[in-house]
Amino acid sequence: MSKLPNVGTTIFSVMSALAAEHKAINLSQGFPDFDCSDELKAFVNEAMLQGHNQYAPMPGLLQLRSAIAEKVEQLYQQQVDPETEITITPGGTYAIFTAIATYIRPGDEVIIFEPAYDSYIPNVLVNGGKPVLIPLSFPDYRINWEEVRSKITPNTRMIMVNTPHNPTGSILQENDIAELEKLVAEFDLLVLSDEVYEHLVYDGALHHSILRYPNIFRNSFVTFSFGKVFHNTGWKMGYCIAPKHLMQEYRKVHQYLCFSVNTPMQYGLAKFLETPSHYLELPSFYQQKRDYFLELMRDTRFTPLASKGSYFQLMKYDRISDEGDKEFATRITREFGVAAIPVSAFYENGKDDHVVRFCFAKKQETLEAAAARLAKI
Ligand code: GLN
């Protein structure tokens, strides 16, 4: 028997295929419908033309790691050593898998908050671990830390957090960090912090990166994505940051999973990161999209839940229908030509609060066309 006999096809493939089949506007899978920077593409092109077309060093190109270390120091006041504490990965999802594969052994328990990005649970299972699922409280999706404490056992090895959170758009707050810090110290837990939407935080809120908190960071893997922030999800480029003693072990696994990552893109990204405005402008760039989408959706019968970060907006549809969310998402794709993700797909037991997720990383005209169709429902 395979290791994941009960796992089906990821909802992102399912909904994007359905959108294509019905020529629907695809607000389901999270990716922009606008292109990445021409300047960045030119940097990659240049690197190729200059002959940087062979294997990069196993942990990644040092120029790129150094540029990341500089950014991290500027933004999060944390000094990380590019030689030993940063590894470039083929995307954020891979960065997460590798951290789990490095430390999770059969029987180890991993705390995962639900709704959860759909790779987390299979990643733990495939490594023989036991996912311990804790619901985020609906509808604001805050963490109940008393409940977390009650779920810790001698087998608890790791706790996974995700801020800004996919799919809910919630973000960790200062009190969450304080609670996490206490638990990490008391139970010596590993932390895996998925921060792929680090720059997509709204209304002036602070991104509480785990990198800001040395007492947590010393036990943590923190994962990032270039695709999510520089609008090129198809490049599959990301990275992981961890203290030296953890990263040393991580690289032992990474070197035998993919060995190293696309060389010219690493050159290109290193050069692109030299200009801080390329990431400093992202919060306002995406906040404009979120605000515009919310304004457009006022003409529909959907009810928005708060989105404080990420490029996702949850919407309740209880004023429209009492169908289950999968049925509803499928029907609106077929009949109204707009695809969304049913949030029950992010729950192991399929918990259904009648909420769907829309991705607003889209051109203005795409958001307008989608909202006009959704207004007819
Ligand atoms: N992270 C993206 C999302 O949540 C999709 C990633 C994927 O398709 N695997 O939509």
Image: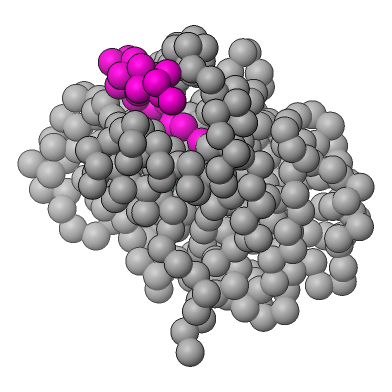
**In the depicted structure, whether residue 158 falls above or below residue 23:** below
User: In the drawing, does residue 205 fall left or right of residue 181?
Assistant: left
Where residue 300 sits: x, y (%)? 49, 17
Residue at 54% over, 52% down: 345
Q: Which residues are magenta?
A: 357-377
Relative to the observer, which residue lies in front, 102 or 218? 102
Residue at 45% over, 67% down: 8
The quarter of the image holding the C terminus is top left
Relative to the observer, which residue lies in front, 243 or 165? 165
The quadrant in which residue 22 appears is top left
Magenta highlight on residue 6: no
Relative to the observer, which residue lies in front, 355 or 322? 322
The quadrant in which residue 188 appears is bottom right
Where residue 340 sits: x, y (%)? 43, 38
Q: Is residue 358 visible?
A: yes
Q: Is residue 265 visible?
A: no
Residue at 53% over, 20% down: 301
